[in-house]
Amino acid sequence: MSLSFEIERGLFQLDFTDYHAILGISLEADTSTIRKRYIKIARRLHPDVCRLDNRDLAQAVLSKLVNPAYAKLSSEREYADYEVLLRMMGNRLMQEHPEVQLQSDRAKTLLQAERFEPEYRAAVEEFAVHQYDDLQRTLDAIGDLSELNYVYLFRREQKNKGWPQTSKDRRPTVPAPPRPSTDSFVEQYFQRAQSLLEQNSFAQARKELQDALKLDPNNSRCHGLMALVYIKQNEVKPASINLTLANSHATKALKLDPKEPIALDARKTLNRLAARAGGTAAKPKTKPPKKTDKGGGGLFGGLFGGKKK
């Protein structure tokens, strides 16, 4: 399985990233279903669960496929934009009839099924069960699911049922409950990043924090720790970009939480480094000029110097 993760089946053939297929959920899934499915996949791909020879691949699948899909579908604004694209895709399927070769027998059957909607839901659930069991076949499983989504979109338009008016039609009307499970995954990323930072594994620590921030972009602790990572990296291999990025993350963290202790430590260190750099740069300017005349010449020399008696 290539780490480029190129999928050329179903909606992917039409230059459309099928995030529902990546997560193994139907196009009708609500926010609760999306969240539960993501948590299940993330646990399945966790380093403590995967076989040793699959850990790198599992991490790549999680960071390059699963996390971006969840970030897109869990954000109300992002999801609303994505849903508009789905509606446009459905219209395109009816108007242009783009040729998409279906490889899955289940998708071919769905294309002819009289009661296609329940058949579609059942097929998605069936395909999703083992979607991430064998990572060597995960792209094929995503392709199977995207073919089902392609057929479902086509059949909906064919039936003139169209697409729901807005994303709110399928979202709970009550405020969303707290998401402790997602927070726990962010905390796991954070703890691993701390441990890696102590081992001076800066690149790996950054990767853990980047994954955490994909789940929770406004996590002040993660931004604060990211600032420290860049500061520590600068101590080993000085580069102005390290301090620039450290400053950016520290500023972001303190904007989110002015009392965030990690970010405050990072800010103190950055201020100290800036003061030291400023002092070094100012030294040549404060060096007194050499005197060129031996006597008390000049304006003040003429006034107060005088000649020795």
Image: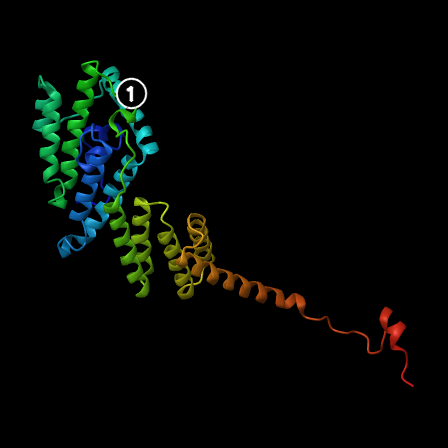
What percent of the width, then of the height, locates residue 213? 33, 47
- Of the 4 image quadrants, the one containing the C terminus is bottom right
Neighbourhood count class around disc 1 (C-alpha, 10 Å): few under 14, some 14–19, many 20 upward: few
Q: Quadrant of residue 76?
A: top left
Residue marked by disc 1: 165
- Of the 4 image quadrants, the one containing the N terminus is top left
Using the image as rendered, state which of residue 180 and residue 164 is in the foreground. 180
Residue drawn at 21 percent across, 13 percent down: 160
Residue drawn at 37 percent across, 57 percent down: 225
Using the image as rendered, state which of residue 204 and residue 262 is in the foreground. 262
Q: Residue furthest right?
A: 309
* Residue 256 position (above or below residue 114): below
Q: How is the image coloured?
A: rainbow
Does dot 1 land on a helix, a strand or a loop?
loop
What percent of the width, then of the height, locates residue 109? 8, 23
What percent of the width, then of the height, locates residue 42? 20, 46
Residue drawn at 20 percent across, 31 percent down: 29
Q: Quadrant of residue 93?
A: top left
* Residue 28 position (above or below residue 201): above
* Residue 59 position (above or below residue 79): below
> From the viewer's perspective, is 222 left or right of 96?
right
Q: What's the amino acid at mark 1?
A: Gln
> From the viewer's perspective, is 131 left or right of 266?
left
Using the image as rendered, state which of residue 200 and residue 4 is in the foreground. 200
